[in-house]
Amino acid sequence: MIYKTFIKKMKNKLEEEKKKHKIEDYAFWQNGYKDPEHAEEIAALNQDHAYIQSSALHGDWFQIRFRNFSHAISAEEYFGYANMFGWRYLDSAISREIHHANSTPKPIPDNPSFVMADLSKDLIVRVIPFPEEDPDENALIYRRYGDIALCTYILIGDNGYDYLTLKLPRQVASEMNLTDDYLLERALRNTSMLYPPVLYDNSADAYYCENELTFAEAESHFFPDGFFLSNIRTVNGATALFYPGVMERIAELLEDDFYVVFISEGIIHIVPASHADPAHLQCRLTDVNVNNPSTILSNIIYRYNRAGAKLQPCDKKTRQSICLVS
């Protein structure tokens, strides 16, 4: 997709949202844009995203206006999204972002804690094993799925191979005056942009990070036996499953429900439900975990149901099998 076509699609999408009364109005501000009426907004965008002080806008932005506030979307960032994931993915992601923007309380500008909202652009998500005993809900921001959880972290460094993070403390989040759902969704979007998802035909390609496919490229492929999912780093690659719209896209690619096997925090196996033996998949996961205890993320397999758009751990009866582990 060329940039000009993308901008046209974005304008059409926002026009639809305006007609549905989800937004009040929108404007497309191009690089170098100046307007005394919007000087503060331009200065804030430049400071927060380009780290410069200028009265001329840096980059192309869609400025979306709601009843009591405005929300900016980077055109270049979302153009990368469209080429990486495809327009259908981006279309649903924009709808979700508008929904969260509408439903999230906004910080009061004259509140000293308002400046902490800038921290949200440095948030990412990691998938971690969920402890047998529930963590202190007042200490962390997380979302649980069976025996794993999405946990919100602050990105403090990246050496090109891995990244350094700190868990986002509940106290800091409270001072930001933002909801858990908003912070998790923002962190997921940040993570998906920094570490886009990739697909592999087989485990060898996934292990050696070869012949990866983007979702846009995968549309012309056939995956009767499923595929392996990760991100461009294969570090924290299991998080890719939880990026906005990814489960729905996988179900579209496979035209089926699917099972998820969390091989490690870096790679997961996706298997179409119609081609899967869940007991066998559970046996394989148990074998992998016994032989690689240091990389265990989950001890159970999961199933995504298209009709309910829901990911759930498989019950014990579904997973039962005679599994001999040497």
Image: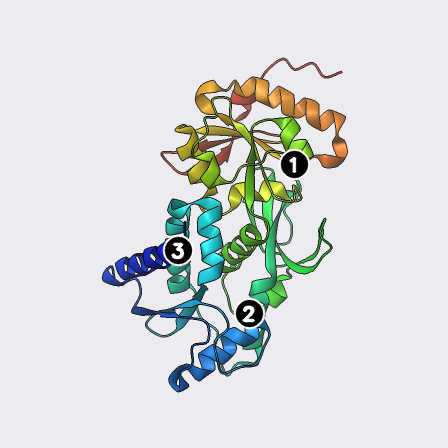
- Return the x and y of residue 150 as percentages of the image width and height: 58, 47
Callout 3–callout 2 Cβ contact below 8 Å: no
Spatial distance from mark 3 to mark 2, Cα to Cα?
Answer: 19 Å
Q: Which mark is residue 49?
A: 2
Question: Which residue corresponds to the image point at 53% horizontal and 21% vertical from the top-left?
Answer: 278
Callout 1–callout 2 Cβ contact below 8 Å: no
SS at mark 1 in the image:
loop
Residue linked to disc 1: 209
Q: Quadrant of residue 5?
A: bottom left
Q: Amino acid at mark 2?
A: His
- Return the x and y of residue 102 as percentages of the image width and height: 37, 64
Asked whether residue 137 is in view, the answer is: no
SS at mark 3 in the image:
helix
Between 281 and 9, the one lying in front of the other is 9
Q: Earlier in the sequence, mark 3 or mark 2?
A: 2
Q: Quadrant of residue 222?
A: top left
